[in-house]
């Protein structure tokens, strides 16, 4: 495994490799972090502070410093790269306003199962159909689980569990199991909404023949 030192920007969210993450920077410590990364063309880490601890996160690179405000605030576009485990978290990093530390880069497997991918693709589309949101998100069967995860309503804790899962096949299974549990609940709620809408309206009912 590769170890490296990174500036660290803990956030209460989960960022995945390949994901675009747009940040509004206003704290002086993180304005310093972003400025230094832009000037040196270096990356920084976003530990996911989801379970009230600093453990796993994603290395990100700055794609564009979109805007700098008169008061020093910044809008910055970044993209996720690789996943890491934090080995040493130091706040503040010596000589800096922001935190930093040593991380171990985690090698993630991106080779999933074709049959599982087809099932995942179908279930994701089924969910959006039941939600009346079909067409809002186009699920491509070539999409990795990382690209699907944020779109199907996972909790932050579930997103974090997926982040720690290094096998694409296991990530496929994780999302399939989630959707199999979620879709019947959504279906039941949508049917309940229909019954509620009908309440109070005149109904044409066939008499039962006893």
Image: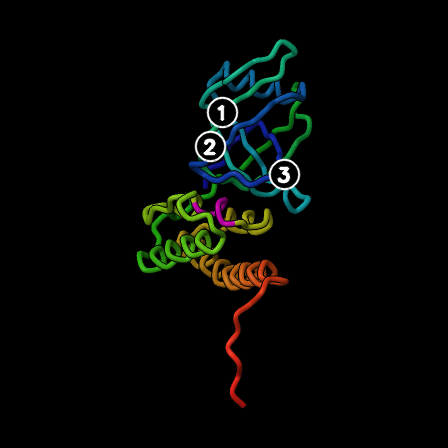
Q: Residue at x 34, y 46 (%)?
A: 140
Q: Which of the 4 quarters of the picture holds residue 86?
A: top right
How many residues crowd mark 2 within 10 Å: few (<14), some (14–19), many (20+)? some
Q: Which residue is mark 1?
A: 77
Determine contact: label 2, label 3, CB under 8 Å.
Answer: no
Q: Are marks 1 and 2 in contact (CB under 8 Å)?
A: yes
Q: Main secondary structure of the magenta part?
A: loop
Q: Is 159 part of what is drawn in magenta?
A: no
Query: Which residue is found at the position 54% from the left and 48% from the top?
Result: 159
Query: Between residues 189 and 203, which one lies in front from this camera angle?
Result: 203
Q: Is residue 126 above or below residue 203?
A: above
- Quick one: quadrant of the C terminus? bottom right
Distance from Cα at disc 1 to Cα at disc 3:
18 Å
Q: Which residues, given as a range, are shown in magenta?
A: 148-152
Say if 21 sits above or below 173 in the image.
above
- Residue placed most toward the observer, 14 or 82: 14
Task: Name the secondary structure under disc 1.
Answer: strand
> Gap between marks 1 and 2, in whole Å?
7 Å
Residue under numbered circle 3: 12
**Residue 74 percent across, percent down from the top left:** 58, 18
The spot of residue 117 in percent (x, y) is: 35, 55
Q: Quadrant of the N terminus?
A: top left
Give me the disc on residue 175. none
Residue ID at (64%, 28%):
99
* Residue 131 point in image, percent of width and height: 49, 52
**Image position, residue 21 (x, y; %):** 51, 31
Residue at which label 2 appears: 20
């Amino acid at each position: 495994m590769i170890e490296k030192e990174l500036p660290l920007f803990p956030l209460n969210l989960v960022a995945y490799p390949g994901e675009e993450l747009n940040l509004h920077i206003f704290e002086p410590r993180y304005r310093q972090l972003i400025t230094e990364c832009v000037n040196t063309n270096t990356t920084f880490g976003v530990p996911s502070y989801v379970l009230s601890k600093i453990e796993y996160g994603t290395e990100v690179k700055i794609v564009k410093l979109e805007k700098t405000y008169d008061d020093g605030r910044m809008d910055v576009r970044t993209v996720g790269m690789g996943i890491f485990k934090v080995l040493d978290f130091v706040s503040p990093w010596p000589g800096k306003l922001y935190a930093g530390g040593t991380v171990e880069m985690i090698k993630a497997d991106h080779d999933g199962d074709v049959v599982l991918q087809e099932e995942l693709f179908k279930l994701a589309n089924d969910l959006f159909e039941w939600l009346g949101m079909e067409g809002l998100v186009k699920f491509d069967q070539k999409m990795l689980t990382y690209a699907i995860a944020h779109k199907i309503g996972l909790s932050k804790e579930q997103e974090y569990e997926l982040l720690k899962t290094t096998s694409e096949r296991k990530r496929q299974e994780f999302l399939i199991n989630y959707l199999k549990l979620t879709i019947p609940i959504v279906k039941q709620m949508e049917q309940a909404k229909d019954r509620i809408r009908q309440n109070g309206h005149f109904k044409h009912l066939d008499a039962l023949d006893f």
